[in-house]
Amino acid sequence: MADLFGGTLEDPFPAYNELREIGDGVHWCEQLQAYLVCRYDDVRLLGSDHRRFSSDVFYDSAPSWHDHTNPAHLQFVDTASRLFMFSDPPTHTRIRSSFRHVFTPSSIAQWEDTIRDVTRELIGRYPRGREFDIMPGFAADVPVAIIASILGVPDEARAKFREWSYGFASTFDPVVQGEMRNTAIAASLELFDYLRGLIDERSKSPKDDLISELIQTETISGDRLEDVELVAQLALLLVAGNETTTTLIGSGLTYLLEHPVVLEEVRADRDMLPVAIEEILRLDPPLHLTLRKALDDTDFGSTKVPAGAMMAPCLAAANRDPRRFDRADSFDIHRSSNKHLAFYNGIHFCVGAPLGRMEVRVVLGYILDNFPNLQLGSTPARRRTTNAVARGWATRPVVL
Ligand code: HEM
């Protein structure tokens, strides 16, 4: 039986390495109420075979978290259950098709300057030469500011937007229960209302922003997203893109600063920065695991997973599987092949991957260009230890 919460959250990798090698690398996990899947080929299979492994898991994982006699909870579930991340074809195909022109490498190029401007503005608030924690006021704020700007959220609403987006993100955290969940749901409902208002405004007078574009985009079924569907997907962009990118900024700084030889190489040859980011994504993916539901009985070696069981493909364990990667625990930016699963694979492959990659490349590139004496702070960084799924940084002290 896998124990993910038993004191391993600060550094879960030794546990992953062990669990991957015990038996068939598939273990029932009481805390997740799911089979944890640790080997690269099995994790990949769960992503690529959506006919056997469903993403329609919202109602399987979330019902016990919500009070079905509470109108606010019901209202929340009505919108949140429409996130296309938690759907299968044909619903998934139809909704995802609205994003087919949005996050392509050529269409995101227009936002590179915005990312640099946001980075300059936010990092400009910190003094040089003094230690500070780069997570709360910078790494956590850059992705929200960028997505707000891309969507077309007016400047004056940005602070509220950030607060709501944290609230919505925490509704996906199983440890957030009771009053904390009520507060998170209240923030999410405010976010939904706000997005509905923006959709109304942009429907009447479109602007040059992503909300206006999505309102007008036809799905491949020839229709347009209903308002409630659009509200859900806009909120999804926030929750899926923010914490993950924040974590990757924290990990990017940490890995580069802890490996001075690599840092020098990246400083000398800026083309190596995206390569280093891919290696950091492999070694330390922002999302450690995700969920699928087995639709048929499936054997993983001698482990029999019954139809209807929840499964948790562990991207972080797969990314260090020695069957797939040589010296899998080493930070090596010269690997000949790095087909990691940090953005997963198959039809749910991260729709925002080009944006996430570009954000982190621009942010780290800006910091390397402008702060030649960048150093780790004297206090060690701390991981967040409350969430087994999204393993972010609680603190990352640095000196600019
Ligand atoms: C480094 C940053 C990021 C990482 C590591 C990441 C990781 C992932 C992963 C692993 C999935 C697959 C989940 C599953 O199938 O269960 C996913 C899906 C998704 N991501 Fe990202 N993500 C990142 C950034 C972003 C950004 C910036 C956005 C948008 C602004 C975004 C939007 C989405 C959406 C909408 C999905 C659902 C796709 C689908 O179900 O078809 N992500 N992401």
Image (cartoon, grey):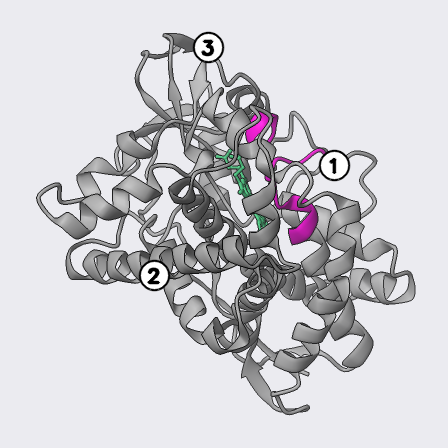
User: Residue 30's quadrant in the figure?
Assistant: top left
Name the secondary structure under disc 3: loop
Q: Taking the image as four quarters, which one is ligand 1 found in?
A: top right
Q: Is residue 65 left or right of residue 196?
A: left
Residue 54 is situated, as x and y percent measured from the top left of the image, at: 42, 21
Cβ atoms under marks 3 and 2 closer than 8 Å: no
Badge 2 amino acid: Gly
Badge 3 amino acid: Gly
Task: Report if residue 349 is visible in the image.
Answer: no
Name the secondary structure under disc 2: helix
Q: Name the residue under label 1.
A: 338
Residue range (magenta): 339-356
Q: Nearer the viewer, mark 2 or mark 1?
A: 2
Q: How far apart are marks 3 and 2 (CA)?
A: 41 Å
Residue at 13%, 45% in the rendered image: 67
The quadrant of the picture occupied by the N terminus is: top left
The quadrant of the picture occupied by the C terminus is: bottom right
Residue 29 is situated, as x and y percent measured from the top left of the image, at: 31, 32
Residue at 50%, 18% in the rendered image: 50
**Callout 3 crowding tier (Cα within 10 Å): few <14, some 14–19, many ≥20:** few
Against 32, residue 45 (above or below) is above
Question: Ligand 1 near label 1 (Cβ, under 8 Å)?
Answer: no
Badge 1 amino acid: Asn
